[in-house]
Amino acid sequence: MERIVVLTGAGISAESGLQTFRGSGGLWEGHDVYEVATPEAWARNQKLVLDFYNWRRDDARKAQPNAAHKALVRLEQEYHVSIITQNVDDLHERAGSTEVLHLHGELLKARSTRDPDLVYELGDKNIQLGDCCELGSQLRPHIVWFGENVPAIYDAMEIAVEADILLVIGTSLNVYPAASLVPAARNARTIFVVDPDMPAMVQGDDSVGCIEKTAVEGVPPLVEQLLEE
Ligand code: APR
């Protein structure tokens, strides 16, 4: 069975109502990254950081998987599908994808600030000041902040190298090491990129199938094409 590796970013969740980061109206237009998404921000004002992620978590809970998330599930009928997402929502899982690796963490989990291996499912709760892990330390969002290591990148690289087909959906490919997964998939026989505004990394690259559409417009027909191959 051929392996399809899918690298997704905020764009695949845009049509589910969740903001992207860098487009017009993007999250980083309304918020200063360095005030809410860095270890320094956490050291300066834990409540501001918790409030930011509590707000994003409530948004993500209200969102529903869209036709692009659901189409990727159908691919599993004919292929071994490995999703590597930069997104911290759980829309891939809720759509039914069975293999999802989160590079930048997960909104619906909390982590100990004393032992990073202590990770807790939040269920329908948020994180408040005074919510502590079993060791008594304040819980933080289980998110990779700017300037922090991306522990999942090693597993992600091993997956990318095995790709027979690579799909890149809804990411500007602006952030590393995530963006380095595209060149890492050098054994892929074909690469498709679905994005209404092609990332600079692939512009003019004739070896890439550029589908200049939104995820909901472009992914379902691409999946049908791949299932008919
Ligand atoms: N369908 C498909 N793609 C879309 C859509 C859509 N409806 N709307 C926007 N896009 C595309 C944009 O053209 C852009 O290329 O999605 C991409 C979103 O890019 P970013 O906002 O930079 O998001 P992303 O690439 O996921 O950012 C990566 O940066 O801030 C960090 O940790 C954060 O995981 C995030 C990382």
Image (spheres, rainbow, N blue to C red):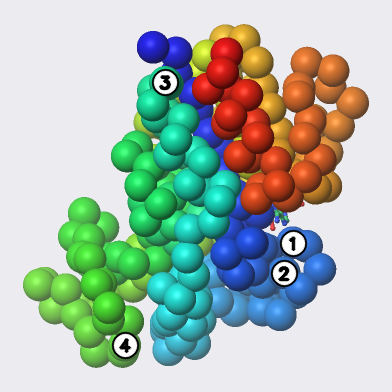
Q: Which residue is mark 1?
A: 22
Q: Earlier in the sequence, mark 3 or mark 1?
A: 1
Residue at coordinates 54% horizontally, 70% vertically from top-left? 37
Q: Which residue is mark 2?
A: 26
In the image: residue 143, left or right of residue 21: left
Q: Earlier in the sequence, mark 4 or mark 1?
A: 1
Callout 4 secondary element: loop
Q: Which residue is mark 4?
A: 128
One can see residue 37 in this view:
yes
Residue at coordinates 76% horizontally, 24% vertically from top-left? 209
Q: Badge 3: few (under 14), some or many (20 or more) residues near its Cα, within 10 Å?
A: some
* Viewer-side label of 4, 3: 3
In the image: residue 201, left or right of residue 141: right
Mark 4–mark 3 distance (CA, rounded to whole Å): 44 Å
Q: Are marks 1 and 2 in contact (CB under 8 Å)?
A: yes
Mark 2–mark 4 distance (CA, rounded to whole Å): 25 Å
Mark 3–mark 2 distance (CA, rounded to whole Å): 36 Å
